[in-house]
Image (cartoon, grey):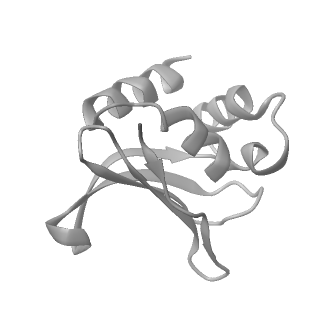
Amino acid sequence: MPKIGPFVTDPKAGAYCQIHLDSGEKIIVNHDKGGFKGGRLTIEVSRLMGFSAERIFACNLDGPDGAAALSRLTGRAQGVDATPLGAFVKYVKDCGSVVEVKTRCAALLAG
């Protein structure tokens, strides 16, 4: 079962959450604005003991595709799940591997 880390918020840098997948890989979901604002949401795979990361997903929440994806994820959500970070963490938290995260995120953007 995946291990979800705490949500970390920095007023200047945004918010992020680390998820340890069943495959042993670690991903970081990052929202550059934090809170309920638009901005950019990215998912990265942590490499080399956290000193390096590979971006596997990026979404402009202010653009039409990103706004539509966010709307689908937060439509009836409440609390932290209604935030961009919370919604995307909930969406990918059950993925078993990075490949599954990529597939699920591509499907979300495709509609």
Q: Name the residue rendered at 65%, 66% in the picture.
A: 33
Number of numbered discs: 0
Expressed as whole percent of the image width and height from the top left, the position of residue 77 reads 81, 35
Res 56 → quadrant:
top left
Relative to 67, does residue 72 appear above or below in the rendering? Answer: above
Left or right, 90 with respect to 5, comes to right
Q: Name the residue rendered at 53%, 63% in the picture.
A: 16
Left or right, 39 with respect to 52, comes to right
Expressed as whole percent of the image width and height from the top left, the position of residue 111 reads 56, 16
Res 40 → quadrant:
bottom right
Residue placed most toward the observer, 72 or 62: 72
Expressed as whole percent of the image width and height from the top left, the position of residue 84 reads 67, 48
Tell me the quadrant of the picture where the N terminus can be found. Answer: top left
Among all residues in the image, which is located at the extreme bottom? 12
Residue placed most toward the observer, 63 or 50: 50
Among all residues in the image, which is located at the extreme left? 48
Relative to 109, does residue 6 appear above or below in the rendering? Answer: below
Relative to 44, does residue 23 appear above or below in the rendering? Answer: above
Res 12 → quadrant:
bottom right
Among all residues in the image, which is located at the extreme front? 1
